[in-house]
């Protein structure tokens, strides 16, 4: 929800809360899927001689 136009903090929080209540519940993650499966994987650094 875009609340950039609202300047009052309390009003903005209330709007966000209402939007959260209205939104459809998020689907639960299947049991066999790792939590970080969508994260970008990091390449391993070169082993052996030091980099620096």
Image (cartoon, helix red, strand yellow):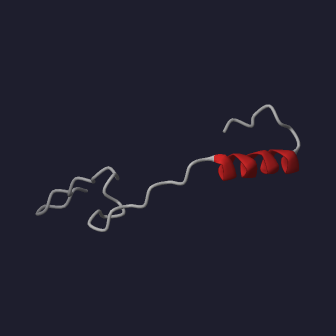
Quarter occupied by the C terminus: bottom left
**Residue 6: x and y, percent?**
83, 36
Residue 8 against residue 42 in the figure, above or below: above
Rendered location of residue 49, percent (x, y) = 13, 61
Residue at 73% x, 52% y: name it: 17
Q: Height in image: 48 above or below 40? A: below
| Residue located 86% across and 38% down the image | 7
**Percent x, y for residue 34?**
30, 64
Q: Is residue 20 left or right of residue 32?
A: right
Q: Nearer the viewer, residue 37 or 33?
A: 33
Question: For this view, does 44 lie left or right of residue 22?
Answer: left
* Percent of width and height locating residue 2: 69, 35
What residue appears at the point 22 percent right and 56 percent down from the top-left corner?
Answer: 51
Q: Residue furthest top?
A: 5
Comparing 22 with 41, the one in front is 22
Q: Quadrant of residue 46?
A: bottom left
Q: Nearer the viewer, residue 50 or 8?
A: 8
Tell me what residue is drawn at x 56 percent, y 49 percent: 24
In which quadrant is the N terminus drawn?
A: top right
Q: Nearer the viewer, residue 42 or 7?
A: 7
So how many labels did they put on this image?
A: 0
Give the residue at the far bottom of this rendering: 31
Q: Quadrant of residue 4?
A: top right
């Amino acid at each position: 929800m875009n609340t950039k136009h609202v300047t009052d903090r309390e009003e903005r929080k209330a709007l966000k809360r209402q939007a959260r209540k209205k939104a459809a519940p998020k689907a639960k993650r299947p049991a066999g899927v790792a939590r970080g499966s969508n994260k970008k994987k990091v390449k391993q650094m070169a082993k052996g001689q030091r980099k620096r």
